[in-house]
Image (cartoon, grey):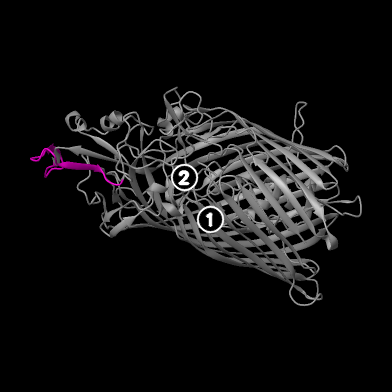
Amino acid sequence: MQLRKTVLLFTTVAAFVAAPTIGFAQDDDSDEVIEEIITTGTAVERTEFETPQTVTQFSEDEVRQFTSSSQADILTQLPGVSAEGGGGEVATNVFHRSLPSGGQFSFNPLLYDGIPTFTTFGLNSSAFDVFYRNDLGIKRTEFVSGGVSNLFGPGSVAGIINYISKTGGPENTGTVQIEAAEEGRFKGDYFFSGPLGDDNSDTFYAVSGYYRFDEGPLQSGLDTQGFQLRGNLKREFSDGSGSVTLYGQAIDDSVQFFLPLPLDGTSRERVAGNDGAEVFTMNTAEAIGLSYDTPDGRFTTPIRDGVLTKGTSIAVVLDKDLTSDWTMNAKIRYAQYDHQFNLFLDGDGIGPNTPETQAEYLTNRGVDPLVAATAQFTFAETGSALPSSYLLFGNRTLDRWRDAKDFSAEISVGRNLTWGDAEHTFTFGGFFSNSQADDINYITTYLGDFRNAPKLVDVTFTGFQEDATGALVAAGDPNAVFQWTQNGLANANGMTGNADRSARRTAFYVADQIEKDQWSFDFGARVERLDGDVKDFGRSNFTMANDPLLNNDLEQVSFTDGSLRAGTVSATEWAFSAGTLYRINDTVNVFANASRGFFFPQIRSVPFNNSGELASYEGEIIDAIEIGAKLQTDNFDGYVAFFYTTLDDRRNVDFENDPNNPGGVIEVVTTQSTEAKGIEASGTYHINDFWSLNANVTLRDSEFTKAENADVLGKEMRRQPSTMFNTGVRFQYANFDASLMHNYHGDNYANDNNSVKLEAYNLVRLEAGYTFEFDDGQTLRVSGNVFNLTDDQGITEGSPRQGNAQSGAPEQFFVGRPILPRRVMLRVTYDF
């Protein structure tokens, strides 16, 4: 059976729009179209058309088609969601319906097979997608926005992303795929499944995974490489009452991450570097090996590894019919990962965080003019002098150790009951999780020239030396050389944080999903308690000397005080949701749902006060309403919906330059309340057997209704455009297929006070392939994929380290992150 997409919505005011969503399956030997059943967080078998909320579903073919590298490739197709992966394959920034967020998966849990990849967000700032990668083992994707379904499992009224894996069947099947792309990318994927034993076996296996090596997408001399192995064993009970499935995952993957870089201050496009070539990234392989002494020994930056994840997870899922009326579902999972998130920052936090002339570099760091007059700038690798016209760019690596453990368990019992002329499905369940994560941070500051993959620069002063107070004074020997930077290493280095955080979540929920004549009703409630522990192993005294480095050994100038502060937080909150759907006829229905939910503040956002106690900890309350209509005909499927959302007392966390300690970074916590409303619509239209169109649109208005900073009140939420839409056209004739997809991301702002406006951009992708057919159902598809077909340089964010201090006024340079450049990819896929 070949999955065929269709789903959601059409727009208001004469515009029909939509995005691929609800998946369909179509029998090759008939014209019958069978809708896929929604499985995320529900005990009732319903299609998307029958659910009293908006649901988006992508088929296996669509997941393959959309994917270029990151989660953003798929999630940006969702109505109401803006997602961007300008940083590379991981740490996707996901924004949904104008909820205030710094990005990542702050409000939308990421699940695989109904099980969270990690249960608690905010023990550190790593995103959920660092732990899992998509592969050929994905059957489909579901995004459920609001409603009773999101009271189950980890819960989120804002919506849950769930990838559902393929399981084995009575026949042996498999897929092998080879992929190659520009900038040195090679990837091999595989999927195999079938019965264990003979053809009458009731135990089935499925295994999938990949190995990938990538010198891009932005070449810096630092590679992305690694593998993942996933699989499952499914045992179906002989009496047909259910199954038990064992899931496993092993990952050892290293991904390079890309932050904003200096762009042209007027056009905000990439500029030429010192060597005349266009600058794409400030990441550089020359930073490998930067090291210095610390109280705990010699520290060497692990920047070569980028975002590194090594570990395993194992889970068991039981689905069981206890009687004809009673059912049970149980899930249990344990995961342990060695994880680092090492990245290059967007400037050294000392000067202007943009390229500087050699004279400006010294002046901005307070070097006495008499000393500066003797300065010599040389390349660290060769010792040759820099041309006087070459610009400099001071930068930092931020190396973060974030080993993590996660345990979760959920059990629910369902009861089907006929009461009068209504069919009730009651669900009673509980969820528990225990998560722990490290958060150890080191900053290393260095000096490079301004080019793609900068070269490290050394600075020396002749005729000066350091006195006992650290000041530079004239040396007795006029030929004495003082080293300001050595091998590129500058003078702001050390540990900036060392914490261990954990959280235990305990939840109970109940739901009643009712079918009565032309009506569907959903009611549900959840009560949850979170208990968290924080251990802070001494605040680091990260300092930068006012004068050059202490000596040629580059002795570290920061230290950890060795003290321990420990504390606990706890909060109990409740959520309630109600929804209804009325079937006007076989093709049209109307629906509405309302929810009162909560998010627990990120534990890393809770500071210690002067008495050594953690600050107050209370739930962040979200209220959401959604009203809409759905239309389903033989050749069109779609919906239109109005939404209204408020979020109170959100603790937002940003990494910004430390104004009191140049070169350092601090976590800035601000409390915000927001309001958002808008219209969302999506739909798919099948013109004939060869052509189909799909589109979706989101029109929204948002503002801060409460903020600690008065300049933020009434402003729009950062990085969330008021207008977004996706359009797509698909053609299939015989063995040839092609798709053209377009994403429009409207004007938005880089920061909360709206001082930096980011212009709209368009992201276009093209996919085309030809399938060769062989005996016994074997196929070989050869396809090409072009990401960012028009090579748009749209800016997705400004400089996070500058925050509200960044200026939007035209200057020589602007620090921002463009979408990734055009990339052509070829794939060969063999199915049997």
The stretch in magenta equals 466-487
Q: Could you tell me which residue is drawn at 66 percent across and 39 percent down?
A: 625
What residue type is disc 1 on?
Answer: Gln
Outermost residue to the right: 30
Q: Nearer the viewer, residue 134 or 718?
A: 134
Where's residue 721, x and y in %? 59, 31
Indicate left or right for 337 with 783 as reference: left
Indicate left or right for 66 with 303 as reference: right
- Density class for disc 1 (Cα within 10 Å; few <14, some 14-19, many ≥20) is many
Q: Secondary structure at mark 1?
A: strand
Tell me which numbered mark, 2 or 1, is placed earlier along the sequence: 2
- Density class for disc 2 (Cα within 10 Å; few <14, some 14-19, many ≥20) is some
Where's residue 59, x and y in %? 74, 50
Q: Nearer the viewer, residue 418 or 42?
A: 42
**Mark 1, residue position:** 225
Indicate left or right for 570 with 370 as reference: right
Q: CA distance from mark 2 to mark 1?
A: 14 Å
Residue 577 against residue 629 in the figure, above or below: below
**Mark 2, residue position:** 220
Q: Could you tell me which residue is drawn at 73 percent across and 53 percent down?
A: 60
